Image (cartoon, rainbow, N blue to C red):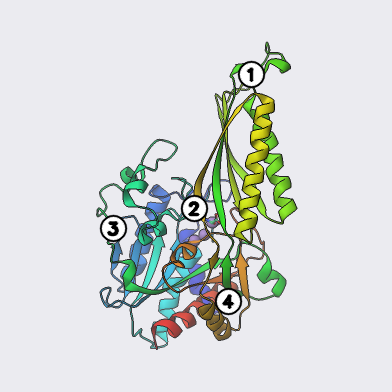
Amino acid sequence: MSDLAGRFRELWDELAPVGRAGSGGYLRYAFTEPELWLRDWFREQAARRGMPVAEDGNGNLFAWWGDPDAGDAVLTGSHFDSVPHGGAYDGPLGIVSAFLAVDELRAAGIAPVRPVAVAAFVEEEGARFGVPCLGSRLLTGEIAVDRAAELRDAAGVSFAEALGDRPAGADPALLGRFAAFVELHVEQGRALVDRAAPVAVASAIWPHGRWRFDFHGEANHAGTTRMADRRDPMLTYAFTVLAANKEARLRDAHATVGRVSVEPNATNAIPARVTGWLDARAAEPETLHGLVEAVRAKAAERARRDGTELACTQESATPLVAFDGGLADRLAALLDAPVLPTGAGHDAGVLAAHLPTAMLFVRNPSGVSHSPAESATDADCAAGVVALARVLEELACR
Ligand code: HGY
Ligand code: MN
Ligand code: MN
Ligand code: MN
């Protein structure tokens, strides 16, 4: 194993047990114990490197190499939080790789001519408060602090309450201190496996969003209510899931209903209400719009037939992200790496609307993500660190 792969493994083994469930997946939600442990780990890694750490009042952490007030900084990093039972690499790989990339540059005697910052963005997955990339959207102002303060988790705790006594309010000037952002991330697909390449550069992120479908019916007894007399929202919900799957296939798009809630959620009671969340994604905005409208129309038509009511609300939207083409081409040439689009959302997708942004992907032999099966080899992770170090040298050290 190369020395760098060994050093990667050493750091990785520190994180591996943190928030790991019996499934082998991770339960690392914003401001919960495992994520707080990871925040402390972040501070310790920064301290070991003499990198002062600042929080931005929204729960995002930044470790600085160079003067935070000098401006024109190159930002790198990713997120610690996970989806329920998510993989180990989605997020943390970008943070661990950033610290190791700083080590690589220092070991080569290379110092930045403009500051470098390592970020840990809060609530990227939206698994606790429901809005993905919440931390980066707060940094960019895409979501106002008071709007975020109202977001509540399943236990009713608001984001503001979860922030606790962290420094209040965001520094609106913080975003202006950055000149570029590069996020390294495990690939969430098989393109690099198919290309037999360890690292790629991102070209774009598919437009995508989340829609909440509320189906209201009439609670009643499972044993005494004739089928003809039911107004069963589970029926309308089930039909909608099938319609979403069919409409996505017709458009070569992606539709997922991975989360559902049922009230009262009793085996022997016809539900009063079923709520399903649709995650829809497509290569082009028009295709995405067409997909969601078709699903919404089919759900409404079925609701009329079932005597149920439908309410559909968009909870988050991510437009097509075309990363800075010049930067992507420059990095692809620098690294001799392929350039790939992705259907996965990232903090880089949010920052890309505000500053030149790039993403590096590291090969995932399983091709699977948002699952304990997500994987990456130490050798490929080391290749990712070397690539990130070269990119930081290119952007911050010349
Ligand atoms: O949902 C996504 O695409 C990202 O992993 N948050
Ligand atoms: Mn993810
Ligand atoms: Mn991620
Ligand atoms: Mn991300």
Q: CA distance from mark 2 to mark 3?
A: 20 Å
Q: Amino acid at mark 2?
A: Glu
Q: Amino acid at mark 1?
A: Asn
Q: Is residue 85 visible?
A: no
Label 2 with label 4: CB-CB less than 8 Å? no
80 in relation to 192, above or below: above
* Residue indicated by mark 3: 170
* Residue indicated by mark 1: 268
Q: Earlier in the sequence, mark 3 or mark 4?
A: 4
11 in relation to 274, above or below: below
Kindly state the secondary structure of the residue where label 4 is placed: loop
Residue displayed at 70% across by 35% down: 239
Q: Earlier in the sequence, mark 2 or mark 3?
A: 2
Q: Which mark is residue 125?
A: 2
Left or right of 121 on screen, residue 249:
right
* Residue indicated by mark 4: 1
Residue displayed at 68% across by 44% down: 244
The answer to whether the residue bearing label 2 lies less than 8 angstroms from the nearest atom of ligand 1 is: yes
The answer to whether the residue bearing label 1 lies less than 8 angstroms from the nearest atom of ligand 1 is: no
